[in-house]
Image (spheres, helix red, strand yellow):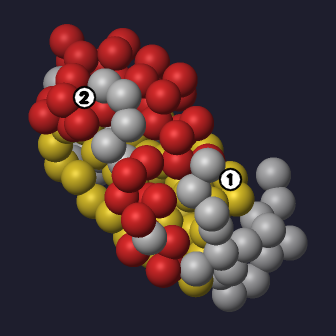
Amino acid sequence: MPVTTKYIFFAQMDVTPEKEALFNEVYDLEHIPALMKVPGVRAIWRGKAEDFAMFLGGEKREMKVGDNPTYLAAYELDSPDVLLSKEWAAGTEVGRWPTEVRPYCSNRRQVMRKIVSSS
């Protein structure tokens, strides 16, 4: 899927195992739909980390998830200012996310990236 914006905001986190099914349900059915209504949010996609192998410097390397967060959500944004909007603030508090999911998330990392090239 081609990136159509100049910025991508990445939110990464772990969730306690007993809340993982709820986390995925709420993220997909409540959290993403609420944030897709925010002006300046163009797309949202999620991923889950897993171990893999690759060739690097001519050697096969085993890459482990390690202490990296398990889940990642990528938000394609028109501007970093989207995250400061009242609509974003309201969207992050919709549904079960703030009370039934957020308290069970840890190892949170957020980063903004400006796209410098894309194909």
Q: State the image quarter where residue 103 is shown.
A: top left
Q: State the image quarter where residue 2 is shown.
A: bottom right
Q: Report the residue at 43% width, 48% height from top.
A: 91
Is residue 22 toward the left or the right of residue 100 in the image? right
Which residue is at the front of the view, 105 or 79?
79
Q: For mark 1, what is the residue? A: 43
Q: For mark 2, what is the residue? A: 101
Q: Report the residue at 39% width, 74% height from top.
A: 84
Badge 2 or badge 1: first in the primary sequence: 1
Is disc 2 placed on a helix, strand or loop?
helix
Return the residue found at the far right.
119
**Whole-percent x, y for residue 109 in the image:** 28, 59
Tag 2: Cα neighbours inside 10 Å, few (<14), some, or many (≥20)?
some
Quadrant of the frame with the C terminus: bottom right
CA distance for labels 2 and 1: 22 Å
**Whole-percent x, y for residue 61 in the image:** 46, 51
The numbered mark at residue 69 is none
**Whole-percent x, y for residue 12 in the image:** 35, 51
**Whole-percent x, y for residue 10 in the image:** 45, 60
Amino acid beneath label 1? Ala
89 to 49, vertically: above or below = below
